[in-house]
Image: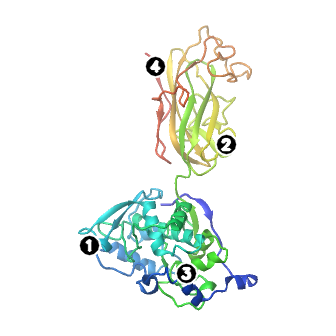
């Protein structure tokens, strides 16, 4: 399984330049005094993340923890966990969890998740409830953002690996991450600003984004961390150093630089729907004369996070690679490539795909169907759109769009509803989708994101 991410950052490890030495210098005693009023006893003396094996911890979760402890010099990836048999195998691409099961053992004092209270919490709400109890809310906003990304990735890894407990993915203590329904405006802002961002390795695989209070210099992953030099290690020393994230942030480093610094070979990615589309409207003929060409226009909202461009985003036949019987060499870029998106489309904008279809030669009325789907840099996504048009024979054996050899005869350069040049019958158009008197169309087949409906062109004799 690989996530196909939009890479936000793949920053090189942080380094302290000689000229920046003064800015990065810090006094551990001064730091402790400055934030001591907010630093909980747990952050000074609590157990390292993952060490508590009380409760009904799954055997696979214990083995996963052991794998994480020996994954030096890099964090454990979800692919490695699956190869080791401590996470379920799947070929599905990673999608951010919608909810997470949290054992509320700190509230009811239960000894196992299956006998205690388990809450199903919206995933981002969970991240919101963890951040102010694992990072100090007065810290720099970039440190808080780094914490939000680490917390989110760690939790998602446990969800994807089957959960830590028999009946819950996580609990609300330091065994996994401290969660409380107690929020803070500054940490809320950090969660919102990083929504959908996760940490992945060089192969695009989700990692176990562990963190602890003081990870030393170097860290357990061998990361040189000059701002933590001389500090006593507190915690397991793997992944993000919480105090170090604050020191780097106050020196001017961004959250993505901080995160990729602590997880060697990592990138911060947006794992939400990167390529997504919603059909907005269409103008499609429903009847053509054999040999006649007519314009088609299909409009989609760009519902993903990638911009569509004319050189990378195309409306193509579905299934892929099949030449259409509606192919018109005058407007198509290939037998299976109808048209690029006109003028591109940024996320949230509407992109237009305009082309023509040419009716095949027939001796009796035949209904032709064709399916299309958007393709961006070789990846299919969005709804599969099916068009259907009845093709009738020419009235006199000539006309109706010509034989296609003459580019001035039977071209598609006319607006929907007008009669094609040289045609003996007008082009008939069906209903339009969209805000202007739109009717639902039974000709749209909506596919799941990244799914490809296996529809093929077919003929049938009209009654």
Residue 461 — which label? Answer: 4
Left or right of residue 405: residue 393:
left
Residue wearing tag 1: 112
Which residue appears farthest toward the left when viewing the image?
115
- Residue drawn 70% across and 24% down? 413
Q: Residues within 10 Å of mark 4 (few under 14, many from 20)?
A: few
The numbered mark, 2 or 3, whose residue comes first in the sequence reads 3
Taking the image as drawn, is residue 102 in sight?
A: yes
Residue wearing tag 3: 243
Residue wearing tag 2: 344
Left or right of residue 169: residue 419:
right
- Residue drawn 53% across and 40% down? 278
The numbered mark, 3 or 4, whose residue comes first in the sequence reads 3
Disc 2, SS: loop
Between tags 4 and 2, which lies in front?
A: 2
Query: Can you say whether 363 is above or below 208 in the image?
Result: above
The numbered mark, 4 or 1, whose residue comes first in the sequence reads 1
Left or right of residue 450: residue 63:
left
């Amino acid at each position: 399984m690989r996530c196909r991410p939009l890479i936000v950052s793949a920053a090189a490890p942080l380094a302290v330049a000689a000229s920046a030495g003064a800015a990065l210098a810090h006094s551990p005693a001064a730091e402790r005094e400055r934030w001591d009023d907010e630093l909980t006893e747990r952050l000074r003396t609590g157990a390292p993340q993952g060490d508590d094996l009380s409760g009904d911890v799954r055997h696979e979760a214990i083995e996963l923890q052991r794998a994480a402890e020996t994954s030096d010099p890099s964090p454990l990836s979800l692919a490695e966990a699956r190869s080791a048999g401590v996470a379920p195998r799947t070929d599905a691409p990673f999608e951010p969890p919608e909810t997470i099961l949290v054992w509320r053992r700190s509230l009811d004092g239960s000894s196992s998740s299956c006998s205690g209270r388990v809450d199903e919490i919206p995933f981002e709400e969970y991240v919101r409830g963890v951040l102010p109890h694992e990072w100090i809310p007065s810290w720099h906003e970039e440190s808080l953002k780094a914490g939000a990304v680490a917390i989110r990735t760690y939790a998602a890894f446990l969800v994807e690996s089957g959960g830590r407990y028999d009946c819950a993915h996580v609990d609300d203590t330091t065994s996994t991450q401290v969660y409380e329904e107690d929020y803070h405006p500054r940490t809320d802002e950090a969660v919102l600003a990083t929504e959908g961002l996760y940490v992945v390795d060089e192969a695009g695989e989700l990692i176990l984004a562990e963190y602890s209070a003081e990870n030393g210099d170097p860290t357990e992953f061998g990361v040189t961390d000059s701002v933590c030099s001389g500090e006593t290690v507190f915690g397991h020393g793997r992944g993000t150093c919480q105090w170090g994230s604050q020191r780097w942030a106050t020196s001017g480093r961004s959250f993505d630089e901080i995160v990729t610094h602590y997880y060697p070979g990592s990138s911060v990615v947006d794992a939400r729907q990167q390529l997504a589309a919603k059909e907005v409207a269409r103008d499609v003929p429903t009847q053509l004369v054999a040999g006649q060409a007519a314009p088609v226009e299909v409009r989609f909202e760009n519902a993903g996070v990638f911009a569509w461009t004319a050189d990378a985003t195309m409306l193509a036949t579905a299934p892929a690679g099949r030449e259409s019987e509606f192919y018109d060499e005058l407007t198509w870029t290939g037998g299976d490539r109808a048209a690029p998106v006109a003028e591109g489309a940024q996320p949230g904008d509407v992109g237009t795909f305009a082309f023509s279809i040419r009716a095949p030669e027939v001796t009796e009325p035949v209904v032709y169907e064709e399916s299309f789907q958007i393709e961006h840099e070789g990846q299919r996504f969005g709804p599969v759109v099916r068009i259907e048009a009845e093709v009738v024979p020419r009235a006199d054996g000539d006309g109706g769009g010509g034989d296609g050899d003459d580019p001035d005869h039977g071209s598609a350069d006319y607006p929907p509803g007008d009669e094609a040049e040289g045609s003996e019958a007008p082009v008939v158009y069906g209903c339009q989708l969209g805000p202007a008197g739109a009717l639902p169309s039974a000709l749209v087949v909506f596919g799941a994101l990244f799914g490809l409906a296996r529809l093929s062109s077919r003929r049938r004799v009209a009654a």
